[in-house]
Amino acid sequence: PPAHAPHRTTLWRTPSPPPAQGSAGDPVDVLAEAAGADPARIEGWLAAMTRLGLLRPDEGGRPRYAHPLLRDAVLTGWPRPRREAVHRSAAEAMLRRGDRVEAVARHLLRTPAVGLSWALRVLRDAVTVAVHDARPADAVGYLRRALDEPVSDDLRQRLLTELGSLEYASADTPAAIARLAEAQHLPAEPRNRVRTAVALGTALAGRGEIRTAMEVLRRTEGRLSGHPGLARTVQTATALLSDEDLATRQEVYRWLSETGRHSPELVGTAGQALLVRYAATAALISADEAMVRVRDLLAQPTDPLAEPFLLGTAAAVAQWADELDEAERLVERGLAGQHPALLHPMQHALLNTRADIVASRGDHARLLALAADRGPGPGSGPTNRDAHALMALVHTGRTDEALHYADRFDLREVPENWELNRYLYARGVLRAATGDPAGALHDFLECGRRQAAREVISPVVTPWRTAVAECRLALGGGPEALALATEELRLARVWNTPRTVGRALRVLGTATGGRRGLELAEEAVRTLRDAPADTDMELIPALLAQGRQLLGAGERGRARARLREAAELAERKGALRWLTLAGQAL
């Protein structure tokens, strides 16, 4: 009998009630059925081998060889065809008994193709379980084995797309691209062709091959002349992935803008949402107008394949507009609609927006947890979540950890993308906090240069001008600081949310000084305190700035009240760095 399987004495016997679906079943009976032997003989054999010390129960009560060398010695004496036949028999027996699907699938991993529908069904069900449990490597093994079974070209195309997606999730990008490219060349109905193209484009863009990704998507779009809705979805994917390359982004958005202006129906609801996002970052639209447009687009019918792009883009705009609850609902809806075994660019984008929402609320502990669970993202460089984690470490006073965290990335090796710009801003925050205003100034200016090249003008994403202004003030450059802070306030009033306007007012007040500076500082505090959203992470530095200005003007009583309020808020938010600064000022 197969010695690696279970037994029947009181030592090995499973409790008598029949196993429910998903249970392990009686190991003795499984062995007996798989080996074609009398259960009593199996039970006696297991008991004898245990007394001799050749077998022993594991933590789950299942029999195992006492030592791996003993197991290998026995099993290598079996011809491979015999081992494979027993594994198949065990799989069939366990399937009849209703054992866990993965337990059955693990036996199928050790057999050649069965050629019967039940085997493919078991392997695909095992993939579903592994994906649900966030074990992409296990799912990859089951899918590879499933492809050994005889399947139609259409099904093989779908399985290869899932396999490539899961290999990407397992950080095996070369294998993922090879699988997805193979899937792309198999016949498939149009919707599956689009899913494969989007997955392949995402994997290529993640490896920095943005031009190849664009070519894949454009070639797919060209084959969808009879399916305008699907073609629009591919166009939207092209626009989103073009964010990874400056020249490509400019080209794509130029076409998208011209087409959307004259024939919005040709770009679809998701494409129009991307144009709203573009207008927001280019300082061409207010938050109120952006939300009116986004909500109108969300109310319109949308193809299911295009919906993730619409939801993800709308969530980002809502987060910038400080509609945080609405943004969170959109993120969760978008993530719930993602196929767990298909690579899609909005998965990464939605997780980024979730981190942005958490940062807006000042939940530093959760930001660090989100960064620890990075998952696969575009490239090997720092992500938006890494930027937030770096700033969370700074805000919580853990500057040594922040410096160590920043050392993980060599930015000279990182290709141009928007997440690098976010990280440069975060590293500037770290350098400013550790007494290096010149280094911080370099990072903030480089962030601003790169953002301007991408036509990201609004401070809603990276408020680099106010950050540069504070560095200039620290280095004695008052006029430059005043000009930058003034420009930031002008742009902030275009978007016109309390967070962006309050931040700009704070820095402009400090740069202006005097009675006018005090008035601006008071307006900043009032704007942020009255905001409907959680703006405490902007209100704390605004209270600190106002307290310092009041102290400089000799108004010690009012200064003390503002600094105490800042200290209380900082303590509540766990912002140790600002708590320390408030204490020093007090």
Image (tube, rainbow, N blue to C red):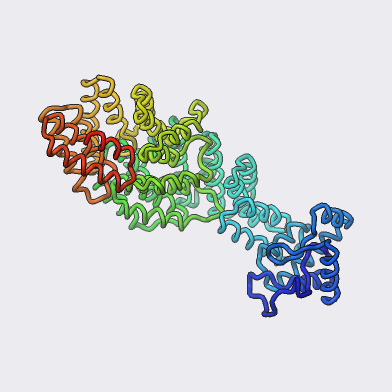
Q: Is residue 266 above or below residue 132?
A: above
Of 19 and 314, nearer the camera is 19
**Side (left or right) of 517 relative to 207:** left
**Residue 135: horizontal and vertical position, in percent?**
60, 53
* Residue farthest toward the bottom in the current orientation of the protein: 17
Q: Is residue 272 visible?
A: no
- Image quarter in which the N terminus is found: bottom right
**Occupied quadrant, residue 433:** top left
- Image quarter in which the C terminus is found: top left
**Residue 357: horizontal and vertical position, in percent?**
36, 48
**Residue 88: horizontal and vertical position, in percent?**
78, 64
Q: Is residue 363 above or below residue 478?
A: below
**Side (left or right) of 47 relative to 19:** right
Q: Is residue 83 visible?
A: yes
**Occupied quadrant, residue 124:** bottom right
Residue at 10% from the left image edge and 30% from the top image edge: 515
Residue at 12% from the left image edge and 38% from the top image edge: 557
**Occupied quadrant, residue 59:** bottom right
State how many labels appear.
Answer: 0
Residue at 34% from the left image edge and 52% from the top image edge: 327
**Residue 200: horizontal and vertical position, in percent?**
56, 44
Q: Is residue 507 above or below residue 65?
A: above
**Side (left or right) of 228 relative to 539:** right
Residue at 63% from the left image edge and 39% from the top image edge: 174
